Image (tube, helix red, strand yellow):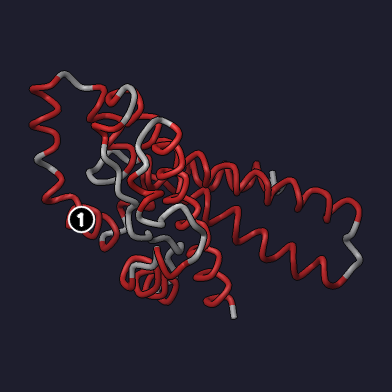
Amino acid sequence: MKYVISVVVLLFSVIVHEVAHGYVAYKRGDSTAKLMGRLTLNPIYHIDIFGSILLPLILLMVGAPAFGWAKPVPINMYNLKNPKRDMILVSLAGVTANFLLAVIAGVIMFFIRNFFADVSVMVSLYIILQYFVVINIVLMIFNLIPIPPLDGSRVVLFLLPRELAEKYAKIERYGFWIILLLLATNVLWKIIGPLANFLIKLISGAM
């Protein structure tokens, strides 16, 4: 059951992440995602079989935190009002959405803990909300790592001078394999684990 809850929460969270990218792009002048029907929470339009389902299940089975991704929403930066600045805003939209989901879950957990602790149905909801906090915090921090094509790398890319940005962008062809290597060697969790654990405990009220 915990695997099912984890995958469902993860799937919802990565979809919200991608929709946030598309929505901010739309508000800044690029309607590509909207025209392609990607500004929706319908999972049919977002599921990536490997990133949304298979990878999370594999990670859960080996005892690692569940995370993954949905199909990236299409963004045409040349439609944006201020391409360089707006691409940074678009890149940060997804992780901001994940942080807000975690905070909302944490607030609800606070009220359940203090006002509905003896109601059995609320206990089940509390457990699901814990998954929301953990998964969204891990997603947020993971995506902020400056390895292309993660969101953190997009922010770095548009902050760098042009010549450095062009060299930095070339790393993207190896980015997926770098991430897999970090996962396989558990280096990734050693990098993001301390901050993730701190924020999870802080938001869930476990400090």
Total residue callouts: 1
Residue lying at 44% horizontally and 72% vertically, measured from the top left: 60
> Picture quarter containing residue 112?
bottom right
Q: Looking at the rendering, in which quadrant would you find the C terminus?
A: top right
Compared to 32, does 155 lie above or below? Answer: above
Residue furthest out toward the bottom: 1
Q: Residue at x 60, y 48 (%)?
A: 101
Q: Residue at x 63, y 47 (%)?
A: 201
The residue depicted at 45 percent of the width and 64 percent of the height is: 66
Residue 132 x, y percent position in the rendering = 60, 57
Who is closer to the viewer here, 134 or 150? Answer: 150
Q: Is residue 95 left or right of residue 91?
A: right
Residue sitting at the far front? 35
Give coordinates of residue 157: x percent, y percent: 22, 30
User: Quadrant location of the N terminus?
Assistant: bottom right
Rendered location of residue 22, percent (x, y): 41, 45
Residue type, numbered disc 1: Phe
Q: Secondary structure at mark 1?
A: helix
The crowding category of the residue bearing disc 1, from other C-alpha atoms within 10 Å (few below 14, some 14 to 19, many at least 20), is some
The residue that mark 1 highlights is: 176
In percent of width and height, residue 64 lies at 42, 65
Residue 131: quadrant of the picture:
bottom right
**Does 30 sit above or below residue 159?**
below
